[in-house]
Amino acid sequence: MKKTIFLFMIPVLFLGCNAPANEQQDLRDEQTDSRTMNEPDSLLRHVVLFKFKDSSSEADIKEIVDAFRALPDQIDGITGFEWGTNVSPEGLGDGFTHCFFVTFRDERSRDEYLPHPDHKTFGEILGPHLDKVLVVDYWARQ
């Protein structure tokens, strides 16, 4: 009886050990897909979260928001822009209060945006008030 249970458990253990590897491969496949997802109907999104220094005033933060909001009119290749403040009741924001959501025509537009003089000027306004930043770029999927 013990041999039967042991023989039954071998395939179960083997399959169980392979599951995480398969899941890891699926994750790698998704990451590869996201790097190559430059299809005509897909959108390149650039998500930026800011945590401001405690010393930053409401006026300082307003100046930063206004400067960021001006970038779509200053930099070609930005096709969409949204922003807002964290209103989540979950308390998981880790101090990040502002979210900016920029959509680019393509990777080239995003790559031209990063070193663009107007983006650099925005960074100079932001810099003295920035405690932490989180940036994620991704190809939107439907």
Image (spheres, rainbow, N blue to C red):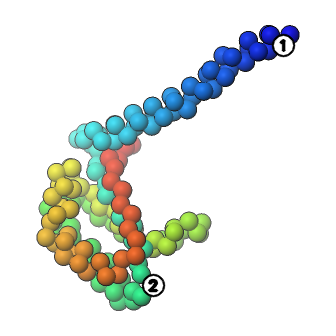
Q: Which mark is residue 67?
A: none
Res. 66 in view: no
Q: Earlier in the sequence, mark 1 or mark 2?
A: 1
Pointers 1 and 2 in contact (CB under 8 A)?
A: no
The structure residue drawn at horizontal position 76% and vertical position 15%, both measured from the top left corner, is 6
Residue 19 coordinates in the image, percent (x, y):
57, 28
Q: Which mark is residue 2?
A: 1
The answer to whether 30 appears left or right of 46 in the picture is right
The structure residue drawn at horizontal position 20% and vertical position 62%, both measured from the top left corner, is 114
Amino acid at the residue labelled 2: Asp
Residue 131 coordinates in the image, percent (x, y):
40, 76
Residue 106 vertical position relative to residue 16 in the rendered view, above or below: below
The structure residue drawn at horizontal position 28% and vertical position 49%, both measured from the top left corner, is 43
Quadrant where the image shows the N terminus: top right
The residue beneath circle 2 is 54
Quadrant where the image shows the C terminus: top left
Q: Residues within 10 Å of mark 2 (few under 14, many from 20)?
A: few
The structure residue drawn at horizontal position 18% and vertical position 61%, both measured from the top left corner, is 113
Q: Nearer the viewer, residue 92 or 89?
A: 92
Find residue 119 and report its image quarter.
bottom left
Q: Nearer the viewer, mark 1 or mark 2?
A: 1
Residue 27 coordinates in the image, percent (x, y):
45, 37
The answer to whether 92 appears left or right of 2 in the picture is left
Residue 138 coordinates in the image, percent (x, y):
34, 50
Residue 8 vertical position relative to residue 115 in the rendered view, above or below: above
Callout 2 secondary element: loop
Find residue 85 and report its image quarter.
bottom left
Amino acid at the residue labelled 1: Lys
Instruction: Kindly report the distance in space between the C-alpha atoms of the residues bearing marks 1 and 2.
Output: 65 Å
Callout 1 secondary element: helix
For this orientation, the residue located farthest to the right is 1
Find residue 115 and report its image quarter.
bottom left
